[in-house]
Image (cartoon, rainbow, N blue to C red):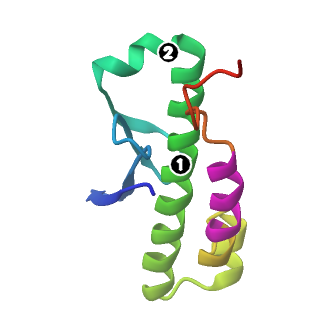
Amino acid sequence: MSKEGESVLPHVTAVTRTNRSGTISVRATDQGLPVDIQIERRELRFGAQPLADEILRLTRLAALEAGARRRESLAQSGIPADILDRLGLPTRDQVVAREDVFEEQETAPTSWLRPV
């Protein structure tokens, strides 16, 4: 399961998502901008493309969660739901549905064993 962390910068909501093994973490804003990426050295052995794919997947997950948190914060401030919809901020239900899709796309192999 991915770890989640949250921090709020002035007028920006950012969330951190981490892969299952805890070797890659990405902190991204609600606009999808990665602001911090941590990679353990052992991840480099798998090559650039799998690493890039995992960073993008974690960035998208973090951005979704940050968007939902931003939506909740703005809704508590009195912003109407139709305005939040037009801003493209996801609802909690939309985040849950999309997370399932992204979790299926996890790029880490489930086993390092090869068929014989």
Q: Is the N terminus in the top left, top right, bottom left or bottom right quadrant?
A: bottom left
On the rendered structure, is 7 left or right of 77? left
Q: Which residues are magenta?
A: 95-104
The residue where tag 1 is placed is: 31
Q: Main secondary structure of the magenta part?
A: helix
Secondary structure under tag 1 reads loop
Q: Position of residue 103 (x, y in %)?
A: 62, 52
Residue name at image x 42 percent, y 77 percent: 73
Vertical side of 15 occupied by 44: above or below: above
Q: Position of residue 48 (x, y in %)?
A: 53, 12
Q: Amino acid at mark 2?
A: Phe
Residue 99 lies in magenta, yes or no? yes
Vertical side of 44 occupied by 103: above or below: below
Secondary structure under tag 2 reads helix
Vertical side of 72 occupied by 113: above or below: above
Q: Amino acid at mark 1?
A: Gln
On the rendered structure, is 114 left or right of 43? right
Q: Nearer the viewer, residue 105 or 28?
A: 105
Residue name at image x 65 percent, y 63 percent: 87
